[in-house]
Structures are given as structure tokens and as C-alpha cells.
Amino acid sequence: MDNVNLTDNFLIAMPALEDPYFSNSLIYICEHNANGALGIIVNRPIDMNLAGLFEKIDIKLEADKLANLPVYFGGPVQLDRGFVLHRPVGQWQSTLAVNSEVGLTSSRDVLSSVGSFGLPAEIIVTLGYSGWDAGQLEDELAQNSWLTVPAKAEILFDLPPEERLPAAMQKLGISFTQLSDVAGHA
């Protein structure tokens, strides 16, 4: 497990993972290095849409086509802070480029652009994120808490939230019902 880098991969919670924050979740890993990992849960919409969020943070939403997009529970860390996963990466004040086409931005300027111009149009807005300290994710992987699969931007931005986990599982050639909650070790 040393030197594994899961940036731009999906984590799929195994059935044995009983943490209510992560049960049945699909997490997109935005950064993974020796200091830890940061990801966004991409299949858990909350009871708020972009119109409601923009009203709360006092940004006018001109782009009506985006008003009904859901806001997501991104994870249990910093629930009072917004994160925007978007394509293309663009030039924002505080963006982590996950790869050449996907970025994660936590600065308000990206939301202002979404509100005024509807750009970037391909977005997932979350409250909170999922984080792991150095070595923590590797330990959880060794305990069979997660499956990993290379991510596809199409799964993130082209599918509704309820189809993202099954689509990621399909990349592995399995369905969620085939997973066991009992880990085996050879």
C-alpha cells in the first residue's frame, strides 16, 4: 500500500463499512499524497438546491437552468463550507486541479461566475468534504473498507446522483449486490 496515489479515483464504500457518513457512498478523490487524502461524496444530494444555496450566501443566480441542481453532502469535514467540483478546471482563486479537466474550488469567485454566467456549467456543489490523515486511507484500504476504481468525468457530470455508484461499480464488472460484508484474507 506504500506510495499509492488515488487522486482522480473513485472510492466505493464496502457493505461492511458501518460509518453512517460513508455507507453506500461514492467518493471522488481530489487529492491523495503523503499528507493524507481529500475527497467529495458525489452521490448524496441534500434537501437544498443551488437556488436555495445562492439565496443563503447572497449571490444572484441568473442561470435558471442551474437553479434546481442539487447541493450535495460532500463529507463530514467543514460542513459549513462549500466546495465546487467542476469541469473545466478554469482560473479561480482557490482551485485544486485534480487532472487536466476537473478542478475543486473552495473560493467564492467560482460561485459568482456560476451565478452570473452559468459557468462552469458542469458542477457538483457540496457542503463539506471527506478527509483522511496521512496513512489513514491506506489503513482503511488494507481493512477492505473501500473498493477503488479509476474515475470518469462522465460519471460525475453526465449521470444523475443515483446512477453514479452503479456506473462506478460497472467499471469493475460487478454490482453492489455482489459485494460481501465479510472480508477474506489469503
Image (cartoon, helix red, strand yellow):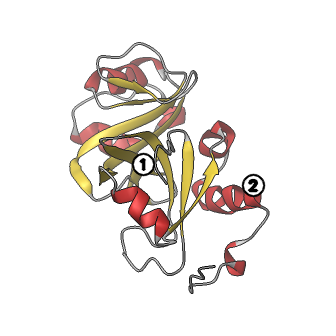
Q: In terms of depth relative to the viewer, which is nearer, 154 or 51?
A: 154
Q: Residue at x 47, y 43 (%)?
A: 3
> What residue is shown with label 1?
40
In this rendering, the answer to whether 184 lies above or below 120 is below
Q: Please state if 171 lies on the left or on the right of 121 as rendered.
A: right
Q: In terms of depth relative to the viewer, which is nearer, 134 or 19?
A: 134
> What residue is shown with label 2?
171
**Residue type at tag 2:** Lys
Mark 2 or mark 1, whichever is nearer to me: 2
Q: Please state if 183 lies on the left or on the right of 175 as rendered.
A: left
Within 10 Å of disc 2 (Cα), the crowding (few <14, some 14-19, many 20+) is few
Residue 175: where, in percent of width, then height?
73, 71
Quadrant of residue 30 within the rendered picture: top left
Q: Which image quarter holds the C terminus?
A: bottom right
Farthest top residue in view: 91
Q: In terms of depth relative to the viewer, which is nearer, 63 or 25?
A: 25
Residue 58: where, in percent of width, then height?
22, 32
Which mark identifies residue 60?
Answer: none
In this rendering, the answer to whether 149 lies above or below 147 is above
**CA gap, disc 2 and disc 1:** 19 Å
Residue 53: where, in percent of width, then height?
31, 43
Residue 116: where, in percent of width, then height?
39, 19
**Residue type at tag 1:** Ile
